[in-house]
Image (cartoon, rainbow, N blue to C red):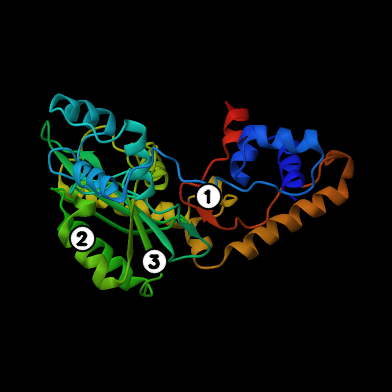
Amino acid sequence: MILALVDEAIRAGARLERACEVVGISARCMQRWRASGQEEDRRRGPLTTPGNKLTAEEHRKVLALVNAPRYRDLSPKQIVPLLADEGIYIASESTIYRILREEKMLAHRSSSRPPVTRPKAQVATGPGEVWSWDITYLPAAVRGRFYYLYLTLDIWSRKIVGWAVHEEESAAHAARLIDEAAKALQILRHKLALHSDNGSPMKGSTMLATLQRLGIVPSFSRPHQSNDNPFSESLFRTAKYRPNYPKRPFASLDAARAWVADFVRWYNTAHLHSALRFVAPDDRHFGRQEAILAARAKVYAEARERHPERWPTGIRDWTPVGAVHLNPEIDPEQEAVAA
């Protein structure tokens, strides 16, 4: 069975060494099996204890040393020379590494905060499941000052579900915005995930307390990923590249709010979104997209019946867009091909 599995992996493009590593044998062992024609595993493992094995007491001493305050932030390659300077030798670097690996202490031993593991990408299969929000600048009339535009959208429908413009950036304003939007759309507890970057308003205590009270699951961008909040960034670009976006700074806070209110109204009700088969966000959010796209498909089908020679590859795809992924995982092979 092992031979068959390895052969299948190699036919699929895997290397022999990597395939053997996965099933727990060496490539040399695989070669011996094939040369001898054996059909059973005759490995018996070591029958004696190595003479150079550390004693239980030495094993405990190694763990005590590497976890001591002086050494817990150092690697075995640094610990062994320091001990040698003091006239102490208890084990080699490779032995210490092996002990730490067996004890699952190799990755992190100090008392500082361990690395944060970010959750995998969220997937929205309907409205009210995943929201994305961010803050951008709007220029004010006073040089060097800005107004702060808070925008929240549902990534499934791209509908702007909440917005606000303030003179300062704060977690309190953000918390109030999310609270009002969740209540207005009657979001169910523990159903919604709210994605953002790692800015202070996004991770402030007021904001996190509001999310906990509403039963909203916070989601944050991965470290060192500048494009990990793409839906909000794309929305900001759409806003600032509108033909009616002011060429001069906003004269007042009220002027900024009035422009944003007009933009949100247009975006939700009239903007034909290219990622949604050119359906307005409100139409998708409230379930009107199926009828709209079906009517378009009927028009195209009738046009093809009149002149089939003009449609050699079929009509345009007007089926509704399905689930929406927040930062989907990219297949390395596809990424290499695209590059």
Q: Which residue is mark 2?
A: 207
Find numbered disc 2 in the image and state the secondary structure of the residue it sits on.
helix
In three-dimensional space, the C-alpha distance between marks 1 and 2, rounded to whole angstroms, equals: 32 Å
Quarter of the rendering containing residue 252: top left
Q: Residues within 10 Å of mark 2 (few under 14, many from 20)?
A: many
Marked residue nearer the N-terminal end (3 or 1): 3
Going by the numbered disc 1, the residue's amino acid type is Leu
In three-dimensional space, the C-alpha distance between marks 3 and 2, rounded to whole angstroms, equals: 15 Å
For the C terminus, which image quadrant?
Answer: top right
Residue 293, horizontal then vertical, whole percent: 65, 58
| Along the viewing direction, whichever of 185 and 211 lies nearer the viewer | 211
Image mark count: 3
Find numbered disc 3 in the image and state the secondary structure of the residue it sits on.
loop
Residue 177, horizontal then vertical, whole percent: 24, 61
Residue 66, horizontal then vertical, whole percent: 22, 41
Marked residue nearer the N-terminal end (3 or 2): 3
Q: Residue at x 69, y 61 (%)?
A: 294
Q: Residue at x 72, y 33 (%)?
A: 31
Q: From what the image shows, is residue 130 above or below residue 38?
A: below
Residue 155's tag is: none
